[in-house]
Amino acid sequence: MHKFIHVMLLLCFMSLSHALAQRKSENKKAQQYYENSLKNLQTHRYEAAIDFLNKSIAEDPTFATAYQQLGDIYRSQRLFDQAIPNYREVLRLDADLTPLTDFGLGEALLHTGQYSDAIPYFERYLNTNISEKSKNLVNKYLADCRFALDNTQASPIKLIKLPPSINTQYDEYFPQLTADQHTIIFTRKENNQENFYESHLSNEKDWSEAQKLIGQVNSDNFNEGAHCISPDGKYLFFTGCNRPSGYGSCDIYISKKENGKWSIPTNLGAPINTRGWEAQPAISADGKTLYFVSNRAGGFGGNDIWKSELGEDGKWKVPINLGKNINTPYDESSPYIHADNKTLYFSSNGWPGYGGQDLFMSKTDTTGQWAIPTNLGKPINNHHNQTAVHVNMNGSIGFFSTQDSASRQLDIYEFELSKDIKPAPVAYIAGTVLDAENKQPVVARVSVTDTDNQKVVFEDRSDFQDGMFIATLPIGRNYAVHVQAEGYLFDSRQYDLTDTQLANEKFTTEILLAHIKTGNTIQLNNIYFDTNKSDILPASKSDLSLLLDFLKTNPTVIIEVGGHTDNTGTKELNKTLSEKRAQSVTHYLLQNGIERFRITSKGYGDQLPVADNESEEGKQLNRRTEIKIIDQKKK
């Protein structure tokens, strides 16, 4: 990409020089210095070119062409403050030298936040004989100026620069936070080499001295950056460029944290990576959707944001462009999909903003369509480039990188999100799956099902090293959480998050999986009945399906279905009700192909409580359906 920019700038300089060939200086020394500057431009020696142009101007202060060339070089290096006086000098000395003076001055003023001053120059340039592509760019710049002038009021958001333990004299950018909010991983560019660093939070306020990631994810010969991290902090998706295993100039790779070290990266391969440019991955909290940036064919122009879904076979599907409500003819970059799975943050220089790259937010509606993006506004965005933003799991704190006005280096800042740019509230489970007998980690499939529509909203596996998993739960729904592993009884839990006050809650749980052994039990926490009735409600389907699959997978297992109630009502009524409910579950299993001899049912009423009946929470725990293994032999 940098080589491409240098080539384009060189062509621009050479084209301009050719057009101005007749505007030579009468001072031979000044003209010679000018021609020497052109020779240095051909080999990208910009500092030398600037030096010769300054010498040329010193010899001939009326040499407008030298001022124009000097302004163009400064502008190409984003030294807009230095470009402006040179363009103004061109207009003073020779206003008809080239229409590009108006464009260059307008762009430099835009990128220094002088929006009202920039507009007349853009409008004048628009009225010259320019291409359709140039007209589109100027109109985009005019839209930026007008947007900025209409949105001068900054929100009361306070930007806090992260400490020197993270921000140094080098560029730091692409911050990513783990779900527990105690580790930040970012990219640092040091001596033109990009590597990953991490810092840990202690005492809820102090970030440790950042260190390179341990393991084999960083390299000495290649650049690594533009990454995302899975909520559990175990998987790192990142951009690797010009590697031997690459498909194109930059590809997306993945590395796993094992025994505290990051593994050798693996190229994600086709269809994610192509012979083009793929970068800046963002993985959804459920691990099923990968967002990334690409310049592949089929986009809207420039770099677009695409997504790929993970198939049932564990392979990534053909990527889909996010469409015109996200992508523009210019560049979109740095996608970040929040844990609510419907709020996308990204950077763009195509949507109206304050100049350069701004940060935006878009949300999907009920049909899955993306809304027109919202500019995050001041003080987050300004006339500098804002490259990436990350929002923590509970949606309260954001981290982003932006340029310092004085040093021009990128640093990482923290801010509190205002209500209008917050994602949907979520809660999450931080769980550990262990063997009930020896307390060793168990690799188990963890799934979360919305009991209202039976949609699986999360699916993952617990880590083989420590049994940990993190599952996100959007607020406002009731969920069944299931944990299954070969050779074990499954675990069924209920999380009722219909109360919006549970937003941003963290549920920590230890799940002890029992072996399939006579006498062991499973508690089904997502079997639902109407009050004082035994008809199974539709919301029970996820637990019933899980039980059915378990019995089919383990055909030698013989079970007892036990019904239990709280102590509301008489003992006789409770026993009768529990018997009928147990029979309803038995009937479901028989209807779905389980042999009669493998199932018995029994109602226990309120005889075997697992909690006290003094509170509604205790009563809810006592209203349950239990499955007991009574034998493992066919009869």
Image (cartoon, grey):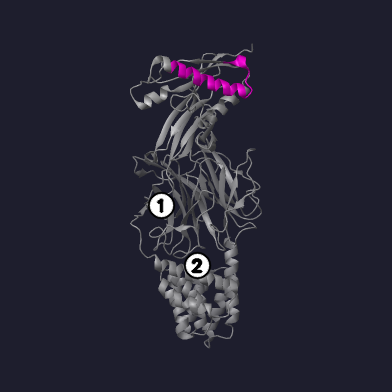
Q: Which residues are magenta?
A: 574-599
Quarter of the image for the C terminus: give it. Answer: top right
What residue is shown with label 2? 77
Tell me where residue 632 appears, x and y as whole percent. 60, 14
Q: Residues within 10 Å of mark 1 (few under 14, many from 20)?
A: many
For the point 65% across and 52% down, the residue is 274
Q: Main secondary structure of the magenta part?
A: helix
In reply to whether residue 589 is colored magenta, the answer given is yes
Tell me where residue 239 appears, x and y as whole percent. 56, 50
Give the Cα distance between marks 2 and 1: 23 Å
Tell me where residue 201 appears, x and y as whole percent. 38, 42
**Residue that sits furthest to the bottom in the current view:** 26
Is residue 31 in sight in this rendering?
A: yes
What residue is shown with label 1? 167
For the point 40% across and 63% down, the residue is 405
For the point 65% across and 38% down, the residue is 313
Inspect the image, locate mark 2, and give the three-letter code of the amino acid beneath it.
Gln
